[in-house]
Amino acid sequence: MATGGVFATTAISSGAAESQHATPTTVSFTLDTSILGTTGIPPTVAPRVATLMQRYDSLSLGDVATLSGRAQFDGARVPAGHALARGSFDTDGLRTDLRENEPRFTATASNAQSRSDRGAHTHSQESTTRREEVTRFVDQNAGETIELSAGHVGVARGNSGVASLQSQHAGLSPTGQSATDDLAGVLGGNAVAIGTIAPPVKRYLHRRLSHLSEAAHTLLDAIRGGGIGIRVGQSETTLRYALAVDETATEADFDAILDEFTSYSSVSIADTTVEQSRWVVDGTVSTPSLWESHERFLGLR
């Protein structure tokens, strides 16, 4: 569960190296891992997940109930980010694994901390405060932190003190950009991801999506951010895509990219909403085809 492995793996999949001073792309996500029993793990990330699970004997994917967090991408680097796994963990076993397998981390003394949970396991908005033992492992050189407590594994990169504290409350947190934060209100489901799309990542996507039409690349330049909400059923999955676009985007571009998307995937479009700066698409796909449909469109298959 080392942050170097988690965040570095994510970064590699998001693009080639760019300037360290480029505007970052910020992605916030939340995932109910129970859906993976129905959908399976996306093939493009399955080998990385398997490697992580094999590295720590005391950790299994079945231990994780929900995973949420936020990451900032600067080209291929992740200068800052945090994630929180909630579930039923062998905390003592994880402490031993970290001490034996991650010598770069220094374990600080365990201490009791107050944790405020707002509707963590229900839809209630009421907040409760409790005390629990937290063990923190820190790599000062890399600015990385791992926190362990009963039912929680938090990881952070960046300002380890601040980011680690944030990891306790990780979720679909604001990206700090109104273009994408406005999209959060229309997205929901078992898995949700939302983020800004900055120039370094756009350059990578132009290369990755070279198989798509000129209209698709024109639209990519107009996108300021986007998100997806996934509601998984046993046989059919409901999807909602939302894009924040600038004034250069046209409805013709929208229609063109929809036609192209459906030609590469088995997603059926049910409804669309075109507004001045926000486009929303509702669709369905057979659950067994969920990952394959998106990977084919993205040129990953």
Image: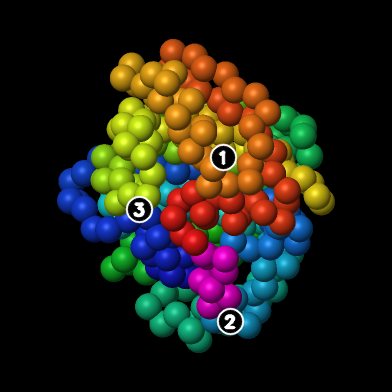
Q: Earlier in the sequence, mark 2 or mark 1?
A: 2
Residue 99 versus residue 62 in the image, above or below: below
Residue type for callout 3: Arg
Question: x, y percentage for residue 66?
Answer: 67, 53
Question: x, y percentage for residue 117?
Answer: 67, 42
The residue segment tinted magenta is 43-52
Residue 126 versus residue 266 in the image, above or below: above
For the point 51% across and 54% down, which residue is it?
Answer: 296
Spatial CA distance of label 2 from label 3 is: 30 Å
In the picture of the structure, the residue carrying the numbered disc 1 is 262
Side of 243 where 40 appears, left or right:
right
Residue type for callout 1: Thr
In the picture of the structure, the residue carrying the numbered disc 3 is 208
Marks 2 and 3 close (CB-CB < 8 Å): no
Counting labels gives 3
In the picture of the structure, the residue carrying the numbered disc 2 is 54
Spatial CA distance of label 2 from label 1 is: 37 Å
Question: x, y percentage for residue 273?
Answer: 57, 19
Q: Nearer the viewer, mark 1 or mark 3?
A: 1
Side of 208 where 119 appears, left or right:
right
For the point 40% across and 25% down, which residue is it?
Answer: 253
| Residue at the top extreme, as displayed | 276
Q: Secondary structure at mark 3?
A: helix
Q: Secondary structure at mark 1?
A: helix
